């Protein structure tokens, strides 16, 4: 066993133990008045983990579909996202099992009652996510076959449908008075933003990447920063120019009440702040600088998922404590464990190809 493999095993072992301890501490908080809050904290981390895993897995498919061939050895960083598929699916089933304790749509009424049926909602999301991960594995196995563009195109299509569904099913219904046609697209685009930042950050950590390849990844981060910002702005603008009072239930707690400070923080960390930081060519070629900016974006996007979920229930105050910390540390440890183990092992499981491992 080489020193690198030994260190990888040690890191994975330590983070796995941390994940188990934090999950136990999270579970111990499920009884009592804070039960819905504890479940919402789990939902927040599920939304972030699933964004990261799915986004990483679909980026190579997007680039192959577009005819790109610049990824080289850094493609294996994205392949590591597949290691998070099982934790993501398990987390979804855990949310389903405890849904009676936290979902606001247990008794749907009106013309949407059939669509918001709890069993149907969770089962359709589980089916679509299993289909997505099955196609992702098929794409990996056929990565350099003659039909690779067919597999990649289908994976991109199923990704867009599946992750839009997550936004419409797990973010919008939290507020029964809020209706949005943008939230599905916002969720799957912002997931690609998270994954692009993670791709840049992990690439800088694990090896000294080629500056041209790193600059291209930096361009993706920059481009999806602009697109994510545009989609959030698109969520806010129609409530004004189309005079839609029902849309203000999203705006008021986040821009007028206690969450306004978090909103300004997100402007700096996620939406507008990265634009001047990444606009130059140097910023995207410098591994240290790009790594720092990418880490800031990843932290900001976790805050953004928290902001999307918790502001619905705690409009007049921002509460952050152990119920949020325990599952966050657990999911962070799971992410580190999965990526650490998969970054070298998954390439060995797929067919021999031109990617250096």
Image: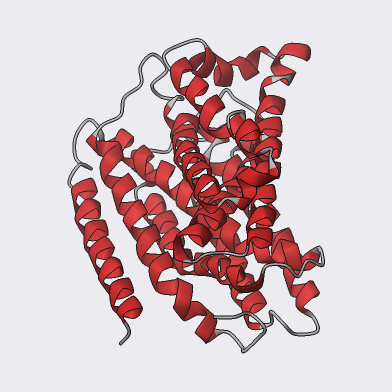
Q: Name the spot of residue 290 as percent of width and height, x first.
A: 55, 47
Q: Residue at x 36, y 52 (%)?
A: 332
Q: Name the spot of residue 322 as percent of width and height, x first.
A: 23, 36
Q: Is residue 214 above or below residue 273?
A: below
Instruction: Say which quarter of the image contains residue 149.
Output: bottom right
Q: How is the image coloured?
A: secondary structure
Left or right placement of residue 267 versus residue 233 in this view: left
Judging depth in this view, the residue of 317 and 98 nearest the camera is 317
Judging depth in this view, the residue of 177 and 305 nearest the camera is 305
| Quadrant assignment for the C terminus | bottom right
Q: Residue at x 69, y 55 (%)?
A: 216
Q: Name the spot of residue 48 as percent of width and height, x first.
A: 47, 47
Instruction: Say which quarter of the image contains residue 245.
Output: top right
Q: Name the spot of residue 71 as percent of width and height, x first.
A: 67, 67
Q: Residue at x 80, y 84 (%)?
A: 146
Instruction: Say which quarter of the image contains residue 16.
Output: bottom left
Residue 176 in sight from this viewpoint: no
Residue 157 in sight from this viewpoint: yes
Q: Is residue 327 above or below residue 238?
A: below
Judging depth in this view, the residue of 182 and 216 nearest the camera is 216
């Amino acid at each position: 066993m080489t020193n690198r493999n030994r260190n990888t095993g040690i890191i994975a072992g330590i983070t796995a133990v941390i994940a188990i301890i934090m999950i136990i501490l999270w579970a111990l908080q499920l009884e009592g008045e804070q039960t819905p809050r504890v479940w919402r904290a789990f939902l927040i981390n599920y939304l972030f983990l699933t964004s990261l895993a799915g986004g990483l897995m679909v980026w190579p498919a997007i680039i192959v579909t577009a005819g790109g061939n610049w990824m080289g050895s850094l493609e294996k960083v994205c392949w590591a996202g597949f290691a998070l598929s099982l934790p993501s699916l398990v987390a979804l089933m855990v949310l389903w099992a405890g849904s009676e304790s936290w979902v606001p749509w247990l008794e749907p009424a009106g013309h949407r009652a059939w669509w918001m049926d709890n069993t149907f909602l969770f089962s359709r999301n589980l089916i679509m996510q299993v289909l997505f991960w099955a196609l992702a594995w098929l794409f990996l196995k056929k990565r350099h076959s003659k039909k690779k563009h067919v597999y990649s195109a289908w994976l991109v299509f199923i990704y867009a449908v599946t992750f839009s569904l997550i936004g419409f099913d797990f973010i919008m219904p939290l507020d029964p008075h809020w209706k949005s046609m943008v939230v599905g697209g916002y969720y799957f685009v912002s997931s690609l933003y998270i994954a692009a930042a993670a791709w840049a950050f992990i690439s800088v950590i694990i090896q000294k990447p080629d500056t041209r390849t790193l600059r291209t990844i930096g361009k993706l981060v920059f481009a999806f920063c602009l697109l994510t910002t545009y989609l959030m702005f698109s969520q806010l603008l129609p409530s004004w120019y189309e005079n839609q009072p029902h849309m203000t239930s999203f705006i008021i707690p986040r821009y007028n009440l206690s969450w306004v400070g978090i909103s300004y923080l997100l402007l700096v960390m996620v939406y507008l702040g990265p634009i001047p930081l990444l606009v130059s060519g140097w910023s995207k070629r410098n591994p240290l600088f790009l790594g720092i900016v990418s880490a800031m974006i990843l932290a900001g996007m976790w805050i953004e998922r928290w902001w999307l979920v918790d502001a619905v229930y705690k409009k007049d105050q921002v509460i952050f404590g152990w119920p949020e910390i325990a599952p966050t540390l657990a999911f962070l440890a799971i992410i580190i464990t999965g990526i650490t183990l998969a970054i070298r092992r998954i390439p060995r499981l797929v067919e021999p190809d031109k990617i250096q491992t």
